[in-house]
């Protein structure tokens, strides 16, 4: 049984917690939260912006390979498929992890911080 226990009006109830995947940069341990931070990391790994492709995507390529990374311009559409594409093309640099979204805001801060540590 997975979820988050929420106390509301004197009643505890279990709310299911939808999971969202996040791309984590392993050397820093930080979740990628924007394209600007992702682009900085990719540039450091030798990826360059490619401007000859689809205008609805940000695309990156490496001179040393035939690989191309295509990401939707809207960061809210950046999903698991894009994350795993980055992971496969950059082994040992990125990892995809589940992030629990719902319920934590309704918990007391002490419980929420403990819950975030449990993995």
Image (cartoon, rainbow, N blue to C red):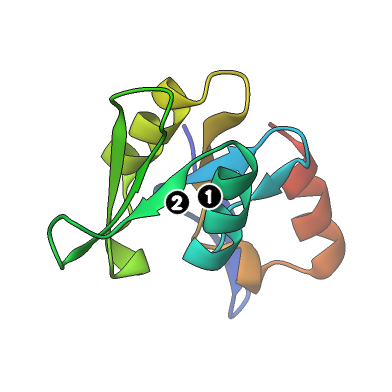
Q: Residue 47 shows which numbered tag?
A: none
Where disc 1 sits, the SS reads strand
User: Relative to 74, does residue 52 appear above or below in the rendering?
Assistant: above
Pointer 1 or 2: first along the chain? 2
Please indicate, yes or no, whether residue 21 appears anywhere in the rendered image. Answer: no
Q: Which quarter of the rendered picture does the C terminus lie within?
A: top right
Total numbered labels: 2
Question: Which residue in the structure is indicated by mark 2?
Answer: 17
- Residue 21's place in the image compared with 27, above or below, is below
Tell whether 42 sits left or right of 27. left
Q: Position of residue 18 (x, y in %)?
A: 39, 51
- Above or below 15: residue 70: above
User: For this view, does 117 lie left or right of residue 61?
Assistant: right
Q: Which of 25 and 65 is in front in this view?
A: 65
Quarter of the image where one finds residue 33: bottom right
Residue in the image at 78% along x and 42% along y = 28
Where residue 55 sits, quadrant-wise, is bottom left
**Residue 61: x %, y % from top left:** 36, 40
Report the residue marked by disc 1: 100
Q: Residues within 10 Å of mark 1 (few under 14, many from 20)?
A: some
Pick out the residue farthest to the left. Answer: 54
């Amino acid at each position: 049984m997975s979820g988050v226990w929420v106390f509301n009006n004197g009643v505890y109830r279990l709310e299911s917690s939808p999971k969202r995947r996040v791309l984590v940069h392993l050397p820093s341990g930080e979740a990628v939260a924007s394209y600007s931070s992702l682009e900085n990391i990719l540039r450091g790994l030798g990826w360059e912006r490619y401007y000859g492709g689809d205008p609805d995507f940000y695309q990156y390529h490496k001179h040393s390979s035939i690989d191309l990374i295509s990401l939707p311009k809207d960061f809210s559409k950046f999903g698991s498929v894009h994350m795993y594409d980055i992971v496969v093309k950059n082994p040992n640099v990125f990892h995809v992890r589940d992030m629990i979204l719902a319920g934590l805001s309704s918990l007391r801060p002490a419980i929420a911080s403990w819950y975030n540590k449990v993995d």
